Image (cartoon, helix red, strand yellow):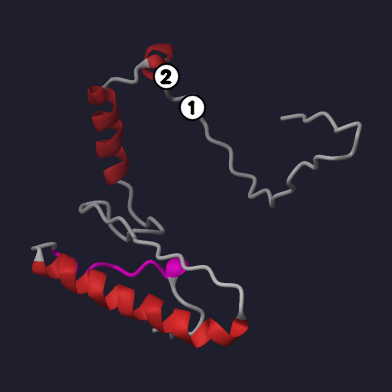
Amino acid sequence: MDVDEDESGTQHVKKVQSYEIEVDFKLLDDEEREDGSPEALTRFDKQIATINGTAYPPTRKKVYSPLNLAYSWAIADYDDIFLDAIRQSTVTIRAAAIAEGQDIANAPLYSNYALFDTPFE
């Protein structure tokens, strides 16, 4: 997509890394491309579920939705306090989910949301 430069120089185009991923819709006919019905989406979801080797979750047989906890603070002296709050929130939310019957005891971890000091294993 081409973006016109801002002549006054007050707004800048955000530059992001290109991963060179191109979605190929050639296998879909015109009718499939335009069909946004729940039935069509269910059919596509079933096809996606058969794909192995996904990044997250490692299987599509069960739906997982990772939870991102975001805290913001400005003073570095409070780092330990807020990091502890994030850890405590994680423990509390996980315990509440299990207590309410959610089967997350063996849910795969989502590494993109890990704190900086989380071990790799």
User: Compared with residue 107, is residue 60 higher up or lower down, i.e. above or below?
Assistant: above
101 or 20, nearer to the observer: 101
Q: Is residue 16 left or right of residue 6?
A: left
Q: Position of residue 109 (x, y in %)?
A: 33, 70
Q: Residue at x 42, y 19 (%)?
A: 33
Element type at marker 1?
A: loop
Q: Residue at x 70, y 50 (%)?
A: 16
Q: Is residue 120 visible?
A: no
Residue numbers of the magenta segment: 103-113
Q: Residue at x 22, y 24 (%)?
A: 39
User: Compared with residue 93, is residue 75 higher up or lower down, i.e. above or below?
Assistant: below
Question: Would you identify the image quadrant in which residue 56 lies?
Answer: bottom left
Quadrant of the drawing holding the N terminus: top right
Specify which label sits upstream in the sequence, 1 or 2. Answer: 1
Element type at marker 2?
A: helix
Question: Closer to the observer: label 1 or label 2?
Answer: 2
Q: Residue at x 44, y 25 (%)?
A: 27
Q: Three-letter amino acid code at disc 2?
A: Arg
Q: Position of residue 83 (x, y in %)?
A: 45, 81
Question: Would you identify the image quadrant in which residue 29 lies?
Answer: top left
- Which residue is tagged 2? 33
- Mark 1–mark 2 contact, CB under 8 Å? yes
Q: What label sits on residue 25 in the rendered view?
A: 1
Q: Three-letter amino acid code at disc 1?
A: Phe
42 or 6, nearer to the observer: 6
User: Compared with residue 93, is residue 14 higher up or lower down, i.e. above or below?
Assistant: above
Q: Is residue 46 left or right of residue 120?
A: left
Q: Marks 1/2: CA distance?
A: 8 Å
Check if residue 108 falls in the magenta segment. Answer: yes
Within 10 Å of disc 1 (Cα), the crowding (few <14, some 14-19, many 20+) is few
